[in-house]
Amino acid sequence: MNEVRNLEISWVQGFTRENVEFVDNKTVCYTCGNHICFLNLETKTRSVFQSPGRGVGALTANGRSGAFAFSERKLSPFIFVYSFPGLELKNELKGDAYLDYTSLTLSDGGPYLGCCSSFPEYSITVWNWENAEVICTKSQAGQDVISLEFNPMNWLQLCALGTTTLTVWNIEKCGSFHLMKPRVIQLPATNGAFAEELPHTPTKSSFIPEMSLSPISELSKMKPIGYESSLPTGATITPSALCWTAASQLYVGCAEGYLLLVDPENLSVSVLFNPAAADAIPELQNFHFQALTLSSNGLIAVGKETVLHCLHIRGTQPSITQTWQLERPVSAAILSPDNDTLLLSSNTGQIYLLNPAESDQITKVLDVLSGNFLTAALLRTDKNVCVSLRERGVLQLWASDGTCLSSLPLQTEVTRLACCPIAHYAAVGTASGKILFVDLNNEKQLRLVHEVYLYHTAVDHLVFDQEGCYLLCSGSDLHLYVLYARPSMRFSVIGYVDVPGCILSLSTQCLGSSEEVKILALCAAQEDKNDDASLLIVFSLPVRSIAGSDCVDRQGCLYNLKVLRYKVPLPLTSCALGVGEVFAYCHSNKSLQRFQLPKDTDGLPSQQMVQLQPKEEVKGHQLGPVSLLLSPDCMWLASVGRDGLLRIRPTESMEKYCELWCHSCRLGGARSVSFSADGHTVVTTGFKDGSLQCTNLRPSCRIKDAYNEKDNYFTQYHQAMSLSLQIAFNSENPVLVTLPVWGHEAPVSCKKTEGNEVGCATIDVMEQDKSYLPTPLNSTWLESRQDAIVKEDIKQHSETKKALRETVRELRETCISTEDFRLVSSSSALSGTWSLGQQTQQRRPDVPLPRHLLQLLQGQPKAFPGQPRDIVPPVCPGPSPGPPP
């Protein structure tokens, strides 16, 4: 590990819907995965601060003192207090929290920090963070607390906002002894009425002496004496927002639309606005308070709607003085320390600025969207543009500095992403089994130019080979599809390869002047579980075109391929194909393994299973599953796991590695990893932390010395590969630009031509084959190909079928004429009164209908509907059908 220098973070993006805080008048901070991002509101530049611990939990900041504090995500977490802009560590606070902290707050009146821990302590603690001393604490006091806020005029008052309660904690002191006493605010009922006043409990019994209770169940039931008795009975309104006034009172907004004024000293509550009142302000009748902040112009109120109100409150009568329209709902409103700038943030990843005193214009300063990233990849460009895909189906482009260039909602559930090395487009796999091709040339206007429907289930893997010849795709069935990656070939499907089991990992290798592309598929055997596999299938595709009957059969199956099958001793979860070797991760013993592939495989039959043993094995990630990826030049092996670590190893020696804590282990760790074309940059995504991280790889001098012998080879490789890819790019990318937007193609005439005969020609229902069925609109490529085979067979044998129909028609006419003549003769001999026309209209019961004549001619008499089982003698040459069954 000492052989490789630490990895360097280039940029981090994401928005986790947590609080946004001012750290000075022009800078705000917010949580982004394992990091804290600082955004300068004037220059819109961003900087990243990496957590010294395990991720970032609760975050708070105080712009007046230039301090910010956050907790880490681990068992028995610490609280770190830093200064800004120097980013100097002021102190580490170790409290009694076992799992996590739910809320933090910093005081304007001194070096004091308030925190609330989660289960099982539920304690509210006030610290002096300068000397890391606990001033006072109260256990089992924060069961439902979601927010803490110091009184800006008096740090000895702390308000705790719960999901259904509102409590003001007064800190009383005597010398160096401090005591927290709760004042529970009695909220109105849902109809606006107040519950009957209850006697106040003496303050001397409002706290519990420390005691030892070992069972957690008993601990969770413990309540402070007098704490529960002061709660009102019945359902009350739900407090959702609060802010302190200069008179140490509280404005409280409620989810039901009520606005309250609370005096913590005498516990009085005044209803400033009742949405059900007859004289209620119409604009506020359906207003649900989300956030409150007090400015020099009045009380700023944020609701779930796309409006922002400034309220002027005279006595107990509010009025609206100003209203702003928003492009989307916002969830928080924070005033800068100098009281000039109002910051608005939304849960969907946008931050807006407003200066109410100067202008009504609302400015957007950040728009990165929110939600978890599914995967990301780097385009092969000099700009090092990153392409990301979110779980909600949004594809985004990011510049080399982390700026969001554009977004494209795909309006479907997505699963995979891969970027083509010879043209600026991305292939996106969907949960419905389609592959979408998105043109990325115009950064401001991304376009969907093509789609292919391959599966009725989700697309599990998408991989381009290094030279951009093929795109490989796999799903939950046993078909591995091969597509042309070149836009000039219209991304057509070449065919599929049958694999013996579900594919868990897919990788390719095509180095230097190789004439073939090698493909490695990790497949599950019958004895394997769902999340690991022990079969390695290696097959090769020629770099030249493989289309034609000598490579693909009529059903679309690729044949004449050299397929090698390998068996490993322990099941694997991920693998990567190198030059004559395979790198794999075994989750059962948490190790990285290297397998050497046999060099002489010409005499091996395709069905023979070759046993492999690991040539090298080193300790891997502690939490899996783990994803592996080789750099394009095969010099570096990257691995990410559920522990959130990114590890980079030189392939020459797997024991050496460098690592970086990229994503939160508590939130699922890392999900995906991708290399740039030069192998110097890596992008990773987290499972549930909503972050995308770009990291630069800086190899140390000792690593470079180890590769001195290979420097010339890899330099030549990079030059040759870059030249080859640039030549292909110059010919293919212009074709991509000219492709129309999918679904907006020029209309195709239904005039019958050779090119559109199958799609537009109609078939006479009397002439079509009974086995033919129209192709459903939602048919996959394979189903459409099978249907095309049926149509081709019908067309190929149409002349034969036409001759047979003519013969049958002539036989039918001969049979009818002969039978009618015999019937007329028989009838004349009996009565002589029936005419031939009457006999034709009143057919005898023993004469079959014309639609059954063909079966009779084939010697298959049977009881037809409405006819007796008489024997009709054959009128044409041939054997007698015999007696009825």
Image (cartoon, rainbow, N blue to C red):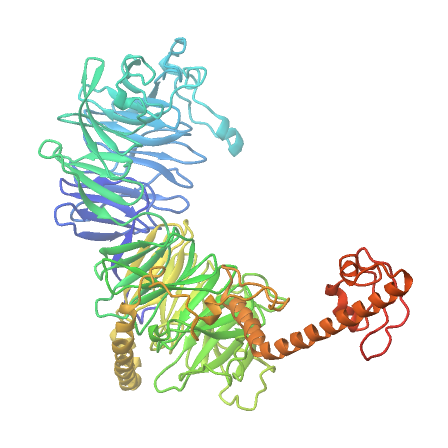
Tell me: 699 left or right of 203.
Answer: left
The answer to which quarter of the image holds residue 442 is bottom left
The answer to which quarter of the image holds residue 774 is bottom right
Tell me: 202 left or right of 156.
Answer: right
Tell me: 210 left or right of 19.
Answer: right
Residue placed furthest toward the left: 358
Q: Residue at x 21, y 27 (%)?
A: 309
Q: Tell me residue 827's x, y (percent).
A: 86, 63
Q: Tell me residue 823's x, y (percent).
A: 83, 66
Above or below for 605 versus 527: below
Q: Quick one: quadrant of the N terminus?
A: bottom left
Q: Nearer the viewer, residue 64 or 684?
A: 684
Question: Number of marks in the image?
Answer: 0
The answer to which quarter of the image holds residue 205 is top left
Q: Quick one: quadrant of the C terminus?
A: bottom right
Q: Nearer the viewer, residue 39 or 272?
A: 272
Q: Nearer the viewer, residue 275 or 802?
A: 802
Visible residue check, residue 88: no
Q: Nearer the viewer, residue 625 or 90?
A: 625
Residue placed furthest toward the front: 832
Q: Tell me residue 508's x, y (percent).
A: 42, 75
Visible residue check, residue 175: yes
Above or below for 171 versus 462: above
Q: Tell me residue 310's x, y (percent).
A: 19, 26
Above or below for 764 versus 65: below
